[in-house]
Image (tube, grey):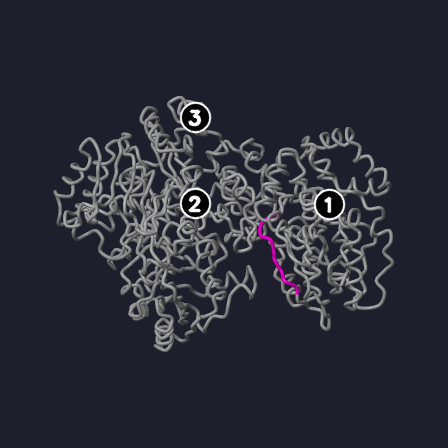
Amino acid sequence: MPGPAARPVSRPGIGAEIRRLGVPDVSDDAAVLGAYSSDASLYRVPPAAVVFPHSADDVRATLAAARELGLSVTARGAGTSVAGNAIGPGIVVDFSRHMNQVLSVDADAGTAVVQPGVVQAALQAAAAPHGLRFGPDPSTSTRCTIGGMIGNDACGARSLAFGRTSHNTLGLRALLADGTDLVTGRDADGTPTAEAANGVLDRVRDVVAADLATARTEFGTFGRHVSGLAVEHLLPEKGFDVTRALVGSEGTLAVIHEATVRLVSTPPAKLLVVLGFPDFPTAGHATPEVLKFEPSACEGIDRRIIDVILERRGPSAVPDLPAGDAWMFVELSGTDPDDVRRKADLLAAAGLGVSALVVDNPVATERLWRIRADGAGLAGRAPSGRPAWAGWEDAAVPPDRLGDYLTRFDELLTTHGLTAMPFGHFGEGCVHVRMDFAFDAPDGPDRYRSFVEDAADLVSSLGGSLSGEHGDGRARSELLPRMYSPRALSLIAGVKQAFDPDGLLNPGVIVDAAPLTADLRYGARTSLRKGLAMAYASDGGDFGQAVHRCTGVGKCRADNSSSGGVMCPSYQATGEEIHSTRGRARLLQEIVNGESDISWGSPAVHEALDLCLACKGCASDCPTGTDMASYKAEVLHQTYKRRLRPRSHYSVGWLPRWAKVGSAMPRFANKSMDVGPLRKVALKAAGVDTRRRMPAFARRTFRRTFAGGGTGTPVVLFVDSFTNHFAPQVADAAAQVLRDAGYAPKITRQQECCGLPWISTGQLDGAAKRLRSMVDALAEDARAGLPVVGLEPSCTAVLRHELTELVEGEDAARVAAATVTLAELLTRTEGWQAPDLSEVTVVAQPHCHHHAVMGWETDRALLEKAGARVQSVAGCCGMAGNFGVEQGHYEVSVAIAEANLLPALRTPAANRVVLADGFSCRTQIDELAPGTQPKHLAELLAGR
């Protein structure tokens, strides 16, 4: 029978009690508790407190406090656990904040000693100079921690070559629930060793010895047998290997604070062979034949995920694939390049599918693997268009039964009226999938239970495991009786009792399982449709569904700059979960979940959102399309409508209004802001950091001097408020470039504003009013098919995205569809020739909204075709419109600029031009890197 659902045990002052008991770094702040209430699973269990240990002594003190206060303890790494393994009602211990170091690397021994919170990618970076790597490579490697990998026995795409985490963990230092030490490892002969006090290990031996037959026959039956506990490693013939038994125990037996792991060398030669198949089950049936070629990776993906990528990112996002509707990515590795090539050619010619392609272009190979790595997030929307959920996402069967499993699984989906986008580790028989469970229906949880019970029976009938690498957690622990006999379950419970007799560690997981439909974080109660300012058209008009786009995959915690990403600059600056896209999404989910006191105006919500730059990086970089900038605007709108707002909302939030006044007397306005005492008083009164300089008004506006477009094809030049009042030279240059390209630029009859400052400060009624005026001004031209050319990326992005969220009607949709960037228009202009830029090195800071909404690749292609050497700076500049000037944001703004932008600007380059189309980007550069003289693309093209 399942155990009880988790019951919140939080009470006022519990953080102070834990601190009094010797735990220095602990929080029971509402924002923190909300952010840690879920991981990457279906479940929501708010903790009583979150501890951020700095040392093993802190962990020991935490366990003592938990025993004293009657609280459970749940260890957590990056919180990317898909089964609900990293949440609990007591104390959650986050190792990723401080205990995140690689302590040593021994290249000769091929080992590393690490703390549990170290990110897998950081370990790889430490091992790489020695020609080594950690073998297991899950798709979340840029943010998952080694401790989390040990907890789940994580694998990844290359487990065929390097095994699971359990194969690569050599020794552990851990604490038992009573605070005593458990130390495991191997002696000089490689024999497993283990030391612990109080007879714990003797009790474990006795449990296993009482039923050796079951331990030998029901555990470890094939390569991805992960569900339950790894009891087989405690057999005498396995040397009573406590290290490997602890790996995959999901934090239920001990709390690990240090690990010794094996490092391996990567074969120097490898090739990717892509095999095409008519459908997914056919690919599964071919797996045993593919395995005869001894691949280092064998991954499956099908048309459904490819179609999502094409829809969201365009045709350029997917390299050429061979014919088919399902594909197998087969990596062959070795020491001899010729031998690897021979095997690749033989595999391609083996006729295992309908087509084959040997990919020998490293760039194309990397792009294909990135598609696979983003699979979990990309699968966050089912083919039906509804949200797709975890819960049955990593079952595994022996590879020779994979085709049968996929065939019968498709039948099961049809029977239950579900759709899905499966992918997975075909070489190990492990399939990842998310499905459109109707949790928002009154009987949604019961329908979910019915499906997973049938799926568990299917997997068990094929000799499989409910989990192939993510662990059982809250999602599958209740199903273990469908996979194991009562004797096997008794063994598992006996081992748990020996290690943790009081059930302190991660309750509800594996033993005394929580009901799999308890504590669901999404359901009928989470819908919120009334009184919203934005349409949330892609989410059925439901704010609850929108914020639940975040599935918790945690890509926002990673440094995505190496792939040109932006998300999430505030987390990279602070390292705090509440400042990640995921952490903020969790707080917003609390607003709609129906069981929380958190509301639109709660200080916890505003604390989490305060350092959100509204950069929109998550809208494109998050695989699920979580758009925190829009959600923040909605929160501010709901909180302050018909209420007094922060001062900065009236100053920088109304900047276009004040710019119109200042431009009437620019010299006086500029001189006033140069007077020291007056400047500081004015900035403080406006809610602006006094270390900032307000931008200088131009001596003349663009509209005042624009003489018309002349002859040529008419085109609308959208001159935004920033360009008109502060940078008219940009519009001058754009008009010249357009004329040279054969266009006759025209502008609206009066100055129109997209309302961006109103949007970013949550004044959405005011923004909608301005956008309706803009639609009225542009509708006739849009109906006539005229392009609307935006110059300021953030304003252009408003017309492409927020416009239809705030203004209904066909005219708004037409204006959005007509809006283009300068590079987009020029690229499609027949006969236009870019000036020669072959002597120019362009260091470009793409505006975040440009990156997120329009994409910057068209600009890059234009510059490279003109001969320029292009270095695009990843990440955000740190200004992000009004964010960087507001009081309380300066340090974070500068820290973000120091991550990528400022180092790039300090690197000398011959004939360098710094390109920054965004007004806020140029402002940040002018302040932090004076003398750099950043230019807009229009200025660069017009000046050549």
Give the magenta range: 868-876
Check residue 91 for magenta coloring: no
Q: Quadrant of the C terminus?
A: bottom right
Residue 862 lies in quadrant: bottom right
Query: What distance separates the C-alpha of mark 2 from that of mark 1?
Result: 39 Å
Query: What distance separates the C-alpha of mark 2 from that of mark 3?
Result: 37 Å
Residue 694 in picture, x, y percent from top left: 74, 39
Residue 826 lies in quadrant: bottom right
Q: Quadrant of the N terminus?
A: top left
Quick check: can you spot residue 770? yes
Q: Residues within 10 Å of mark 3 (few under 14, many from 20)?
A: many
Q: Residues within 10 Å of mark 1 (few under 14, many from 20)?
A: some
Residue 876 in picture, x, y percent from top left: 60, 48
Looking at the rendered structure, which numbered label has been put on residue 442?
A: 2
Quick check: can you spot residue 443? no
Measured along the vertical axis of the image, is residue 144 above or below residue 284? above
